[in-house]
Image (cartoon, rainbow, N blue to C red):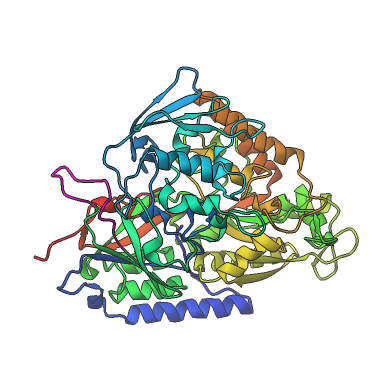
Amino acid sequence: MNIVSLSRIFKSKRGLIVGLVGMLVALALNACNPAGLKTSAAQPNQLVISILSDPKTFNYALSNESPNIFGLTFEGLITEDPFTGEIQPNLAQSWQISEDKLKITFTMREGLKWSDGKPLTVDDVVFTFKDVYLNEAIPTDARDVLRVGAKGLLPTVRKLDDKRVEFITPEPFSPFLGVTGLPILPAHALRSFIETKDSEGRPIFLSKWGVDTPPNQIIVNGPYKVERYNTGERIVFTRNPYYWRKDAKGQQQPYIERIIWQIVESTDTGLIQFRSGGLDSVAVTPDYFSLLKAQEEQGGFKIYNGGPAASTTFMMFNLNQGRRNGVPLVNPVKSRWFNTVEFRQAIAYAIDRQTMINNIYRGLGEPQDSPLYAKSPYYLSPQEGLKVYDYNPERARQLLTKAGFKYNNNGHLLDASGNRVRFTLLTNTGNRIREAMGAQIKQDLAKVGITVDFTPLAWSAFLDRLDNTLDWDTGLIGFGAGFEPNSSANLWMPDGGSHMFNLKPRAGANPIEGRVVYPWEAEIGQLYIKAAQEFDQAKRKAIYAKSQQLAQEYLPMIHLVNPYSLAAVRDKFEGVKHSATGGTFWNIQDIRVKPIQ
């Protein structure tokens, strides 16, 4: 996701401070000598980029957040073309789908190996799905996208012979071929962790391959393996010598020897490091786009534009009405507001998204209305009937009045019981786009009498609120998107692991009493199930259209702005094909460092 800093000085005291910080950063950047942007004559065969925070685990099955290492370290049976969404062979060289649409038979490539040199076989595929992803004892979000039908039944997998593996779904499941892109894990390294139980009868797998695991114990099949991890500093990857891909001339890929992820908790700091030559690529935020664009040639880099980013950015409400240990998760007064549809719609009308685009994104973005990616074939546009909430503060006031709210003599909004409407909006620190958006939302809602306590938190603390304690009012966050809507099923299924606006407790967490699932909420989940059963593309589009209409009518999340996917990459690299869905280095195996001239 592209990240942006505040681009104007807001009138409020907090806005003024943030704006001055942005000005000081801009001055620091302009003070940089553009000549310093050029790389040195010695061209090390490596790529250096930055991430905002430390990864939380090296165990794919237990991961549910970004940043993570798995795009470099693991691959699945198939992959997806990031420009078209077409399914392509990967670890499997081919597949066949049965006439009844219930079976897919994959034929594996010859000579596949793990990073420790041991063979990667059909047995690893069966282990990965049967013993990990389909194992109810493993609390993995991967299982959500494997569930089939209204009953959420799981597929079965079996070995046919040394080259072929067969998946059987209990009913036709249109997205299943794409789901088989889930990473394949090493049976020889992990099977004993599944079979061995701790004192409470749980697989010790749940505590394995954490970030404290020695890197040489992390066995992978992707183009890179972890060489070193220094907490709060960097992750170093080196080429996997047994990676399966070779180029047309038979040369082993990937070509780049090392990849270094510097952990830089501020996007501004990352930009400064890129300009000074410390980083080889950086996401381009709109507020610095003009500055960097003017220095492309002199600085020795190129800015790539992948079009609308493959992500959604939204403000969401905590609709969970449950109690934990007898204590409401959400203050009951605020919960009544959040669970009033007109209140949520009024908030949407009160947010000036076009001003966000003009001032925060510098015009480098588009209004976002649908939960689906704009390039998905199932996207429903406003022109096709999707409800939108263009800026209309008067309409916001009308809806609030209709819902029983009123204004006092000072223009503050009160509920029917006389409580002043005030709530907290959380987001993560270090993400300047969200900090800027949160500051504007605070100002916009003040214009309709609502007080917002905008509170950026450290990423880990923010996730803990959303995922574990469930103690939050509203949040500003993003979610990945792609061509296939079912990839976001766990966001919309009421029992999904990413159903953030009304999350059920995690496995092993204290139970919640009194959680309520709304009829519209359940219907959206059912529509995702129905769409997954349908193979006719026109019918699938109609089903997903209904799901988008419900999401926009009942509005548990207010979608905001879809920025353009922009990245700057040094000219020393060749083979870069930036994509909004795949990112800058989706084809890392094909990218080279140019030889010194």
* Front residue of this view, candidates 141 and 105: 105
248 inside magenta stretch: yes
* Residue in the image at 29% along x and 53% along y: 588
Residue 422 left/right relative to 566:
right
- Above or below, 193 against 210 in this view is above
313 inside magenta stretch: no
- Residue 508 location in percent, x, y? 69, 56
- Residue 123 location in percent, x, y? 41, 39
- Residue 287 location in percent, x, y? 43, 67
Residue 73 left/right relative to 457:
left
* Front residue of this view, candidates 106 and 53: 106
* Residue in the image at 69% along x and 42% along y: 553
Asked if one can make out residue 595 in the rendered structure from this viewpoint, the answer is: yes
Q: Bounds of the magenta span?
A: 238-253
- Residue 198 location in percent, x, y? 61, 58
- Above or below, 344 against 148 in this view is below
Residue 93 position by quadrant: top left
Asked if one can make out residue 562 in the rendered structure from this viewpoint, the answer is: no
By secondary structure, the bulk of the magenta-drawn segment is best described as: loop
State how many labels appear: 0
- Above or below, 419 against 79 in this view is below
Q: Residue furthest right?
A: 417
Residue 474 position by quadrant: bottom right
Residue 313 position by quadrant: bottom right
* Residue in the image at 27% along x and 64% along y: 258
Query: Which quadrant is the C terminus positioned in?
Result: bottom left
* Front residue of this view, candidates 192 and 498: 192
